[in-house]
Amino acid sequence: MVHADGQRGIAVTTDVIQLEFSTSLTWQSLVIRKCCHSPFSHVDLVHERGLLGASDPGGVALRPFNYQKFGIRRRATIATPLASRIMELVLSQVGKPFDGEALIAFMEDTPRDWRTPDKWFCSELIVWAFEEAGFFCYKLVVPKNRVSPADLLLILNPAIDADKFHLPLPLKWEG
């Protein structure tokens, strides 16, 4: 396995994966939250060395745990024997750009294939990795041109430890 910074590492074998749902203090976060009727505008996969996901600027990258000023942060814990494969799939996308067209898709119905792996929006990257790893026993039917963090939360809801999800995380920012 190759880490986001190019260093070779040992693949972490685990049967638990964590996602961090959050919101920031930016106008883009406000737009996503309002359009999706959700307190969350972003999601990252929790890696042992930071938060892994698609964001602007920088695209898909491994970032420090407190890489931005967060408003709300909640971690979803999912038990699955596919956790390592999901992590590998997301790591394989490091370096790909952020999909800014996804932000436009929140406001209009322009045709767009969110599964195209040339650029990523945060929640679409995570759903893609879960789907590619075989987490779902069916291909997801998404009746719109995007997958929001709120959609992801609903899609994964049966697998999330709900008791742990509501515990708040510290909002400390080191920027």
Image (tube, rainbow, N blue to C red):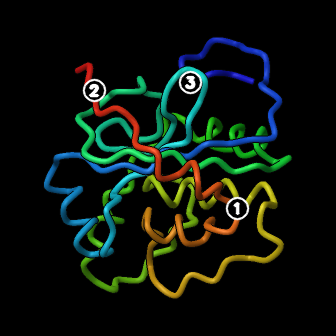
Rate crowding at label 3 as few (under 14), some (14 to 19) or many (20 or more) other CA atoms within 10 Å: some
What residue appears at the point 33 percent right and 74 percent down from the top-left corner? 36
Nearer to us in this view, 143 or 167: 167
Residue 101 appears in which quarter of the rendering?
bottom left
Using residue 100 as the reference point, say whether residue 95 is left or right of it.
right
> Which element type, helix, strand or loop, lies under badge 2?
loop
Instruction: Specify the amino acid type for callout 1.
Output: Ala
Closer to the chain start, of discs 3 and 2, is: 3
The CA distance from mark 3 to mark 2 is 24 Å
Label 2 belongs to which residue? Answer: 172
What residue appears at the point 50 percent right and 25 percent down from the top-left corner? 50
Using residue 142 as the reference point, say whether residue 122 is left or right of it.
left
> Which element type, helix, strand or loop, lies under badge 1?
helix
Rate crowding at label 1 as few (under 14), some (14 to 19) or many (20 or more) other CA atoms within 10 Å: some
Label 1 belongs to which residue? Answer: 159
Q: x, y (%) of residue 4?
A: 56, 24
The CA distance from mark 1 to mark 3 is 27 Å
Q: Quadrant of the N terminus?
A: top right
Residue 47 appears in which quarter of the rendering?
top right
Q: x, y (%) of residue 2?
A: 68, 22
Mark identifier at residue 4: 3
Q: Quadrant of the C terminus?
A: top left
In this view, 163 is above or below 107: above
Mark identifier at residue 9: none
In this view, 31 is above or below 100: below
Viewer-nearest of discs 3 and 2: 2
Nearer to us in this view, 68 or 147: 68
Contact between marks 1 and 3 (CB within 8 A): the answer is no
